[in-house]
Image (cartoon, coloured by chain):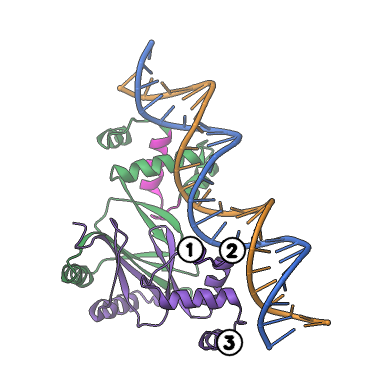
Chain colours: A purple, B green, C orange, D blue
Amino acid sequence: MKHTDELKQAGLKSTLPRIKILKLLESTRDRHLSAEDVYKIMLDNQENIGLATIYRVLTQFEASGLILRHHFGERSVFELADSDHHDHMVCVECGTIIEFHDDTIEKQQVSIASLHKFKIQDHSLCLYGKCKNCQ
Amino acid sequence: MKHTDELKQAGLKSTLPRIKILKLLESTRDRHLSAEDVYKIMLDNQENIGLATIYRVLTQFEASGLILRHHFGERSVFELADSDHHDHMVCVECGTIIEFHDDTIEKQQVSIASLHKFKIQDHSLCLYGKCKNCQ
DNA sequence: CTTCTTGCAAATCATTTGCAGGGCG
DNA sequence: CGCCCTGCAAATGATTTGCAAGAAG
């Protein structure tokens, strides 16, 4: 009952929809999914979970730190918060998402912020363009 | 008729709503406005312009390169494309927006992208946090 | 049992579109 | 005068909320 425990630790009651969604996020090859994506996959898997529930669960997961929400362009996508911080490149052609991390950029952000007496809580860096297969 | 010319150069017929919106964007103290912001300001100024028109005009301005569209969080904001490229810090408390530019970050982005054979078309970097007045 | 959850439908929000009347070139 | 533009209302797409029926502890 690993998932049950994960949920409890996050302060959430262990319910079927939550377990299924968490399982999906942990197992999907494509780490970044929108609420709609999750909904469709559940449908394909014969799982009957309402879209509203998916939105609610994803929001709860985000609030409890289990997952991260990103705004790429105008849609929200979620990813499991299991890896270290990273930024993204999104292929405008095929939607492929490449994750990357760069210390130089991270540090530079902090120093620029302090220059303006600005206290960073969060940041989003996203490069849009074409991946190597789409050029 | 400076604005008329600007519009013509952008390939747009010079009409009252367009001129007024362009004027507002050029004169507003707060360089970053959402469609709703523009709408409300127009209302306050006794200008009768429909929200739909504002969206249409802003979209046309963006397409012709007169302005830039950003997605901060979930809403779109627009700014005149009159200055050099820069990124933003947004205060989650008061909404203040600070613009900044950093060559180190820009260069680093390019080199990381090429490392992944990714061709950057655009990018968005936004720091969220608290400005010096809101801490 | 009591409370937190879910599913479904209705409600929102931001943005877009259809259409008939108006204004620019 | 023809065509592009505008206002208004209705349509959309994404996400949220109300509510009665169901599960979890």
Judge left or right: residue A11 versus residue A91: right
Q: Earlier in the sequence, mark 2 or mark 3?
A: 3
For residue A50, the mark is 2
Q: Magenta segment: does it hold A33? A: no
In this rendering, the answer to whether B111 lies above or below B56 is below
Q: Earlier in the sequence, mark 1 or mark 3?
A: 3
Q: Which residue is mark 1?
A: A44
Q: Quadrant of residue A116?
A: bottom left
x 48%, y 78%: residue: A23
Report, in whole angstroms, how far the alpha carbon at label 1 lies from the one at label 2. 13 Å
**Marks 2 and 3: which is nearer the front?**
2
The residue stretch that appears in magenta = B17-34
Q: Residues within 10 Å of mark 3 (few under 14, many from 20)?
A: few
Q: Earlier in the sequence, mark 1 or mark 2?
A: 1
Residue D10 drawn at (x, y percent): 59, 36
Q: Nearer the viewer, residue B52 or A16?
A: A16
Residue B112 drawn at (x, y percent): 19, 72
Judge left or right: residue A109 versus residue B132: left
Give the SS element for disc 3: helix
Residue B6 drawn at (x, y percent): 28, 37
- Labels 1 and 3 in the same subunit: yes
**Marks 1 and 2: which is nearer the front?**
1
Q: Residues within 10 Å of mark 1 (few under 14, many from 20)?
A: few
Instruction: Name the kind of residue labelled 1 in the image.
Output: Asp
Instruction: Name the kind of residue labelled 3 in the image.
Output: Lys
Q: Which residue is mark 3?
A: A8
Q: Chain of mark 2?
A: A
Report, in whole angstroms, how far the alpha carbon at label 2 lies from the one at label 3. 22 Å
Instruction: Name the kind of residue labelled 2 in the image.
Output: Gly
